[in-house]
Image (tube, rainbow, N blue to C red):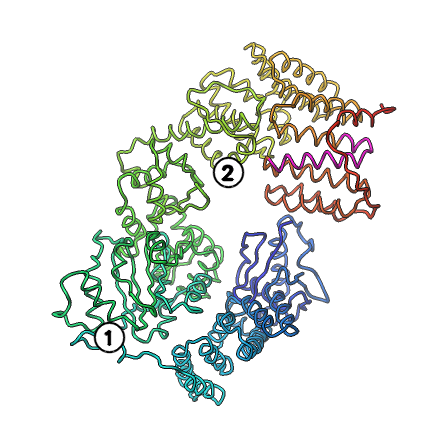
């Protein structure tokens, strides 16, 4: 079972494993927040109703709560039947309780760390307090409606935070350790700007870490806030903190210390654009940004390069960040749009930007030097020993930025660019920050800020569709929100319908203003590309997705693409989400589709190259994954994979892509590729449990082979479709297909294919309980594999015969067949086959009551499956291993095996198997311990025969 994690000390969030889940509409999210705030204690139904509706709940409130509870249970446990309670959200004391501990809930971790700090030595206590406060990622229960967030239960959490922050600060001021505590103290003080106790300790903490000037700036900012909000002056505690800083303050450079050129007045520029009034989300990004200024950061020039695709909100975040920290840079703020990616295509010359900065700093135009180097020298002289915030927006590349960087410490430089600026990171030590798309919650918050909470909450389904169709791109959301705001009478469902009616295009995101027209904004990035990268970007639209490997991209282009791929990722038109694998946003794909349709690119040739690539790769992988399988002749070269592990890894990584590629071949009339892909994919899809996919692929491939009149392919794919259909319970198609496959192979005189057809026939007979007929068919297949010199095929049939004899309770016969299979596999380097036989030996021994020995073979099978990376069959062996442990009396080992299997089930998404394993764990019997003697695998055959003496 994948672990659950919950957060309430900041945005209300929950995760299953590493995947964050959407907690639902605001009131349902508020219910989750309430359960989390109670931290494992029961919440009565009356308390729930009171928090969600206050003094005037609707008559349906209890039913609504029950519905929310049911929704949350199914969210936490997707396979949970209706009305079932499950393991997480439990009925308790007339209400509900969410099971949580310090490992799953941030609130309980916060309390546990704080409790440990109270009894620790001072130095260790400060660290524990800092760790506890670091659990806070914003205000308690952020993301639920503000009215609900003001309820006492959530206000109490904030008070806990204040209490711990005060205790931690006092300890750090007395015993040291303030540097590590300061970020958490600052965050708590920012959240509670009118709490003079916190603000006083922040002022003292800043001074204690050598930041007297910032401490005094903070004191002044708090004084202004108190005057504006409450009409009062700072109290004794805050005034005492200021006096302490002034008494200890050493000389701080001021304007008189700054070297200036004669005739240049000292000016404090304030050039920042206005902050976005409806700024939403980006909490983690903003926290990471603010953390750059912690510690001793300003002893050097801090350069942050904010990158990301067009429309992702780089400038919005940078401006918001700059406004948040502007008070820390008393000598001013400089801003310039460098037009690196602009509709006019003309990037600003650095000299032009320098001249504007010099003028902003008070240099008369006639005193600005002509030479670029002299301008840079004057600029850096004016900034020496000053604290200035510089925002360089929309930079094209590192060369455009370098002349604008200060030469002395104390300043902050924020740079936004669609280019990743790797040169600036490498040589100037810039700190890269790549913005991702909005998560669902941030996207919903953005719409709510722009359209109002009430309008968004009134149509949750329409909002969900808008968010989905905008793909998390802030620019797209803003365009749609602007249309909705301009038409307040329009229901949001109508706006969603407009997006639905134009799928795969950018028409719904068009705007008269090029600055917010998604197509226009994308075009500025595209026009900056070289010819090779621009061509590749267009051709990638022909790839069916969901992602593309570097090899597939090269096949599309028909040439090496390392440099074009690097250029596209630098321009944020592609994202390398895994090594060598690239993905583009859906709206960028739509833009590329428009471009390739208008271009002179040979699209058919590119698609053919792409299909050739996947067909050849798939057959290369299949030859390692199933070495005894019949191989068709291909026109192109087939690559050689290193081993079965590499082959399985390739199939697994490409599985979603391959399904799309098969559809692309079928829709495009590439019939040869269709049947060849189906042939190559069968064994992987069958053995890894992707039976529905296998049936789909085989149907498409068989139809293509029939159109071409390719009888060998028809014979093979009829058999493959029969097997997949039987897996899905469609035995009419299965019997028809296997009969036709046998007939075609007989007519063709294809002994290798006939052996495989008899093998599948035997398996099919076994599945329906016709065991004697199954054995006869398997023996025919075994003879044919032997006649065609296929020892791996022989081993597979011996393995199949063993399983049928196990079903007949003929364990000794089964063990003999498995021993012979091991001999056949010896030296073939077929770990997949070896693992299957060892698992079979374990099962046979288990059925014969040899539980300890069964455990040994299962463990060896597990080792091989793990070496290959075969999660699906590892789960099956773990299930068997748990059975043998339990039968041998080792309850703890059985539980460990089944729990591990359950954890892995989530990776392969198999609800039925997960339910079976949960039942095993639920009804696990107490039994005796298992002896520790673990026989070696050597001499396996002799031991199996010895165990059969006197047996059937």
Q: Can residue 162 be seen in this view?
A: no
Q: Which residue is drawn at 79% across and 32% down?
A: 847
Q: What element carries label 1?
A: loop
Circle 1 packing at 10 Å, graded few (<14), some (14-19), many (20+), is some
Q: Mark 1 points at which residue?
A: 259
Reply yes or no: does residue 853 show up in magenta: yes
Question: Observer-nearest residue: 205 or 921?
Answer: 205
Name the disc covering residue 943, or none: none
141 left or right of 732?
A: left
Residue 726: quarter of image: top right
915 left or right of 724?
A: right
Q: Residue furthest right?
A: 950
Q: Is residue 675 visible?
A: yes
Assign the magenta stretch its main secondary structure: helix
726 left or right of 485?
A: right
Q: Position of residue 950 (x, y in %)?
A: 88, 24
Does label 1 or label 2 sit earlier along the sequence? 1
Q: Where is residue 694 in the image (x, y as percent from the top left)?
A: 55, 30
Discs 1/2, front = 1
Q: Distance between the residues labelled 1 and 2?
A: 60 Å
Residue 506 vertical position relative to residue 194 in the rendered view, above or below = above
846 left or right of 682?
A: right
The residues colored magenta run 844-867
Circle 2 packing at 10 Å, graded few (<14), some (14-19), many (20+), is few
């Amino acid at each position: 079972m994948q672990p659950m994690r919950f957060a309430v000390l900041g945005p209300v969030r929950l995760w299953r494993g590493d995947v964050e889940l959407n907690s639902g509409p605001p009131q349902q999210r508020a219910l989750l927040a309430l359960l989390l705030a109670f931290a494992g204690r029961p919440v009565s139904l009356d308390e729930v109703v009171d928090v969600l509706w206050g003094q005037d709940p609707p008559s349906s409130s209890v039913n609504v709560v029950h519905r929310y509870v049911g929704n949350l249970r199914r969210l936490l446990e997707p396979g949970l039947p209706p009305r079932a309670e499950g393991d997480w959200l439990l009925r308790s004391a007339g209400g509900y309780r969410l099971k949580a501990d310090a490992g799953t809930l941030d609130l309980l971790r916060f309390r546990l760390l704080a409790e440990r700090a109270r009894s620790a030595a001072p130095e260790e206590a400060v660290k524990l307090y800092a760790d506890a406060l670091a659990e806070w990622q914003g205000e308690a229960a952020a993301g639920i409606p503000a009215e609900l967030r003001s309820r006492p239960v959530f206000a109490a959490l904030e008070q806990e935070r204040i209490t711990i922050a005060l205790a931690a600060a006092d300890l750090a001021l007395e015993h040291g350790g303030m540097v590590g505590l300061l970020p958490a103290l600052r965050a708590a003080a920012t959240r509670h700007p009118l709490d003079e106790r916190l603000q006083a300790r922040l002022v003292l903490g800043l001074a204690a870490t050598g930041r007297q000037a910032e401490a005094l700036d903070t004191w002044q900012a708090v004084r202004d806030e108190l005057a504006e909000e409450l009409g009062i002056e700072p109290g004794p505690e805050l005034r005492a903190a200021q006096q302490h800083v002034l008494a200890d303050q050493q000389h701080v450079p001021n304007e008189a210390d700054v070297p200036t050129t004669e005739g240049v007045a000292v000016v404090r520029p304030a050039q920042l654009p206005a902050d976005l009034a409806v700024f939403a989300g980006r909490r983690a990004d903003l926290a990471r940004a603010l953390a750059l200024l912690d510690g001793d950061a300003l002893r050097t020039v801090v350069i942050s390069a904010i990158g990301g695709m067009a429309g992702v909100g780089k400038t919005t975040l940078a401006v918001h960040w700059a406004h948040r920290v502007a008070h820390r840079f008393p000598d001013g703020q400089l801003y310039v749009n460098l037009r690196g990616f602009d509709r006019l295509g003309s990037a600003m010359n650095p000299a032009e930007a320098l001249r504007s900065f010099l003028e902003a700093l008070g240099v008369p135009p006639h005193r600005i030097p002509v030479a670029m180097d002299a301008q840079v020298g004057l600029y850096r002289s004016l900034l020496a020993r000053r604290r200035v915030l510089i925002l360089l927006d929309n930079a094209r590349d590192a060369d455009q930025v370098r002349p604008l960087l200060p030469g002395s410490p104390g300043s902050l430089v924020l740079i936004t660019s669609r280019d990743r600026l790797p040169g600036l990171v490498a040589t100037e030590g810039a700190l890269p920050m790549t913005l991702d798309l909005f998560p669902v919650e941030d996207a919903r918050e953005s719409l709510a800020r722009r359209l109002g909470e009430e309008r968004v909450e009134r149509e949750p389904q329409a909002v969900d569709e808008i968010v989905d169709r905008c793909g998390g791109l802030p620019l797209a959301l803003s365009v749609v929100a602007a249309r909705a705001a301009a038409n307040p009478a329009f229901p949001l469902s109508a706006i969603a319908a407009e997006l639905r009616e134009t799928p795969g295009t950018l028409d719904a995101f068009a705007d008269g203003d090029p600055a917010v027209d998604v197509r226009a904004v994308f075009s500025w990035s595209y026009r900056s590309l070289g010819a090779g990268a621009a061509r590749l970007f267009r051709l990638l639209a022909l790839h069916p997705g969901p992602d593309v490997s570097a090899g597939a991209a090269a096949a599309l282009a028909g040439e090496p693409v390392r440099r074009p791929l690097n250029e596209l990722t630098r321009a944020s038109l592609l994202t390398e989400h895994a090594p060598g694998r690239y993905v583009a946003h859906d709206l960028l794909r739509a833009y590329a589709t428009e471009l390739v349709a208008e271009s002179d690119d040979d699209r058919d040739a590119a698609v053919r190259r792409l299909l050739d690539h996947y067909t050849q790769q798939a057959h290369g992988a299949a030859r390692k994954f199933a070495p005894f399988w019949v191989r068709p002749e291909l026109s192109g070269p087939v690559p050689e994979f290193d081993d079965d592990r590499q082959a399985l890894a390739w199939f697994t990584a490409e599985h979603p892509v391959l399904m799309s590629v098969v559809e692309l071949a079928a829709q495009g009339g590439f019939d040869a590729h269709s049947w060849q892909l189906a042939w190559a994919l069968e064994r992987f899809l069958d053995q890894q449990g992707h039976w529905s996919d296998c049936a789909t692929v085989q149907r498409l491939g068989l139809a293509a082979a029939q159109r071409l009149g390719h009888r060998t392919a028809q014979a093979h794919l009829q058999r493959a479709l029969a097997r997949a259909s039987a897996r899905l319970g469609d035995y009419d198609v299965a019997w028809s297909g296997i009969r036709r496959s046998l007939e075609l192979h007989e007519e063709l005189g294809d002994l290798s294919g006939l052996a495989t057809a008899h093998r599948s026939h035997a398996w099919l007979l076994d599945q329906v309980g016709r065991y004697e007929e199954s054995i006869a068919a398997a023996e025919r297949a075994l003879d044919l594999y032997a006649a065609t010199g296929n020892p791996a095929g022989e081993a597979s049939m011996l393995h199949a015969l063993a399983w049928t004899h196990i079903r007949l309770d003929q364990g000794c016969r089964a063990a003999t067949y498995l021993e012979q299979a091991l001999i056949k596999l010896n030296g073939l380097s077929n770990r997949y086959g070896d693992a299957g036989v060892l698992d079979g030996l374990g099962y046979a021994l288990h059925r014969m009551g040899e539980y300890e020995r069964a455990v040994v073979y299962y463990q060896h099978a597990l080792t091989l499956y793990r070496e290959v990376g075969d999660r699906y069959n590892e789960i099956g062996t773990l299930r068997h291993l748990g059975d043998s442990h339990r039968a041998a009396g080792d309850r703890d080992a059985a539980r460990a095996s089944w729990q591990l299997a359950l954890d892995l089930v989530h990776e392969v998404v198999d609800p039925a198997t997960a339910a079976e394993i949960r039942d095993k764990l639920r009804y696990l019997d107490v039994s005796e311990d298992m002896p520790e003697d673990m026989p070696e695998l050597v001499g396996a055959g002799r031991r199996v025969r010895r165990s059969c003496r006197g047996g059937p």
